[in-house]
Image: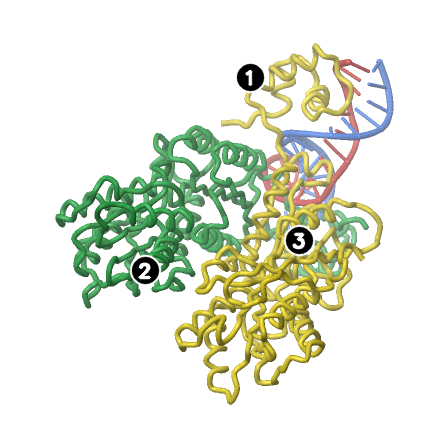
Chain colours: A green, B yellow, C blue, D red
DNA sequence: CTGAAAGCGCTAACAA
DNA sequence: TTGTTAGCGCTTTCAG
């Protein structure tokens, strides 16, 4: 079964391939009559452009590559969904790659995307330093936007949320709910998300005079299991904090679950917060207070940046996320105000 | 910045492009000396094949398209992850498309994948009948495997689990735990998964003499919210079942959550089961007893089928899933035995 | 407004 | 073993 080409259409319409191309790609001058003739011939034959040939010809594939640390993390899933949706509307296709939180796999996938001549790459780097080389080399070759996470020592566009501002809201909210001491549970400091969030946590906690003990900074992994383990560790300590701030919702889900298992009441005895607002956050027991990441907006900005062929000026777009108050915190009755920075492009 | 081509390498090595191609693609006879010379030239220049040109030349792109109803459903996410992993190991790339549970979007995405000359397509059809036309038309043009769900009236390969056998295990387990009546909560009957599971449920319930009232068959959506609503509906009825069998874990999560809200104890008053064994199943309160879907295996089989250029014989591969017993059922102490069919290819 | 022809980068006959 | 060359399907000058 031979795939129908532009030549077949040309033959049937009794014209040249050039004319067919002009009609079907919509550019170039054509008479109405000719337009109709060609179009109906194409219709009859069930012609579809061969995007490979077109891509070879004009050097653009209409595809975008996306690399995430782990697609099974609902936050990244949500990001992927948003990106895919935006691209779909522009008639572009998405190459999805899962780096399995491994900088080496990530580097291989990036190289393979370059080899495939994608028009641009969206990457949420797996590692805060080890991802650097591959990301930079890729960015030197084609448009690249980092999403959510950021690798030190790279010069590329970035879109994400303002973690510092987010943590300010979190701490203020907990403080309003009566917390005077707090623990932080996150991943190892191998990615910018945890780094930023911990730094924002420390800063605002200090500002508001909250107690933060060294042994209350628990860093390991973005998993439910780690959240559960962390509570076990906290429970053996001499003192227990008024609040546990988690670097993402998976951890927070583990924390609330473990608290229940340990007979520690949330939010009465300890307030707990998450980050990301994944779809399962509200399923926590109690439902999680968390920071909502505007994934649709992040995706839209990222795709927009990729398209912007423009100059060498790099854009770092930090969106200010909003706190979603549910039942895992006491919070006072008013929504947190917080003097959140204006954000936006800078 | 001009991308380095095979001609550049040829010039630098002082040979023809054909030789370079032979060396770099590994096929065709080349002397060792020539091999080294060309390779080092390629190395120096940082040459990378242009996969687009290669694809145009030999009619294969090394890409596979995948279309799922909703990537935010953790079950499909897991399937995508598995497929992506298998493909990555073969040096292939994955085009991911989210159909948003809409047969029209799905049809468009399928067409676009065909236009992109993917080597094959893996699709979990959104709709049991409306997806038919597009799926069949696509399958007529290139290798296509249906995953998990199946569209009526199509002639394609399929890989999934044996829903009937799964339901047999579920019912037997519930029965062993003392259930003598049961409700079923699923999606509308617009996809084969729910159809099959409901049918398996009905059959085995009848076999074991369980009571199933008409108003206990509740069909709407694969969401947590629907699970919650369904319990509300059941609670208003004259009688309440001993068990609630859910068509997927999201629904089951909603069901257990609503039971808690209604003060109905699980599993003491009502046993609940899910389906899929998504990563959040164990986070239910209580942790869900559910049917584990071997996504890695399903993915591996699907990719294998795509590669099998072979004859016209269609393969329907039904893997027999296993029950994962957790705390939402009483279950008796022994694992369910069940005379599950041998399964495998048929 | 339409046609002829070159060429994107690569591979595979065919020749040498 | 290596080189020459045609051609994958498309778009786009350049002529007419």
Residue A45, placed above or below residue C16: below
The residue that label 3 is drawn on is B122
Is residue B30 in view? yes
B314 vs B279, left or right, is right
- The secondary structure type at the circle numbered 1 is helix
- At label 1, counting other C-alpha atoms closer than 10 Å, the crowd grade (few under 14, some 14-19, many 20 or more) is few
Is residue B146 in view? no
Q: Name the chain letter of the residue that bears numbered label 3.
A: B
Residue depicted at x 75% and y 25%? B27
D3 vs A83, left or right, is right
The residue that label 2 is drawn on is A263
Give the foreground label among 2 and 3. 2
Give the foreground label among 1 and 3. 3
Corner quadrant of residue A311: top left
- The secondary structure type at the circle numbered 3 is strand
Q: Name the chain letter of the residue that bears numbered label 2.
A: A
Residue depicted at x 75% and y 64%? B154
In the picture as drawn, the residue positioned furthest to the front comes out as: B333
């Amino acid at each position: 079964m031979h795939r129908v080409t532009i030549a077949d259409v040309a033959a049937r319409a009794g014209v040249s391939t050039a004319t067919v191309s002009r009609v079907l790609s919509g550019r170039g001058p054509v008479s109405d009559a000719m337009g109709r003739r060609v179009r109906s011939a194409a219709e009859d034959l069930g012609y579809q452009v061969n995007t490979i040939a077109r891509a070879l010809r004009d050097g653009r594939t209409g595809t975008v590559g996306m690399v995430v640390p782990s697609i099974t993390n609902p936050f990244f899933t949500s990001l992927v969904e948003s990106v895919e949706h935006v691209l779909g509307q522009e008639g572009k296709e998405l190459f999805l790659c899962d780096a399995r939180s491994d900088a080496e796999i990530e580097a291989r996938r990036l190289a393979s995307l370059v080899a495939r001549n994608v028009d641009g790459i969206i990457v949420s780097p797996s590692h805060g330093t080890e991802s650097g080389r591959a990301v930079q080399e890729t960015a030197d070759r084609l448009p690249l936007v980092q999403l959510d996470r950021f690798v030190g020592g790279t010069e590329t566009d970035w879109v994400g949320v303002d973690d510092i501002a987010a943590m300010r809201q979190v701490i203020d909210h907990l403080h309003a709910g009566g917390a005077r001491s707090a623990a932080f549970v996150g991943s190892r400091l191998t990615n910018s998300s945890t780094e930023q969030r911990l730094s924002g946590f420390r800063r605002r906690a200090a500002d508001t005079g909250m107690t933060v003990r060294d042994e209350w900074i628990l860093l390991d992994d973005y998993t439910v299991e780690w959240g559960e383990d962390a509570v076990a560790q906290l429970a053996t300590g001499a003192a227990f904090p008024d609040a546990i701030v988690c670097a993402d919702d998976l951890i927070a889900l583990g924390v609330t679950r473990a608290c229940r298992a340990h007979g520690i009441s949330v939010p009465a005895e300890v307030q707990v917060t998450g980050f990301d607002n994944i779809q399962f956050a509200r399923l926590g027991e109690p439902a999680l207070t968390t920071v909502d990441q505007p994934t649709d907006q992040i995706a839209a900005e990222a795709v927009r940046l990729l398209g912007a062929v423009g100059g060498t000026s790099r854009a770092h777009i930090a969106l200010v996320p909003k706190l979603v108050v549910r039942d895992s915190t006491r919070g006072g009755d008013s929504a947190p105000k917080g003097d959140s920075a204006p954000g936006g492009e800078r």
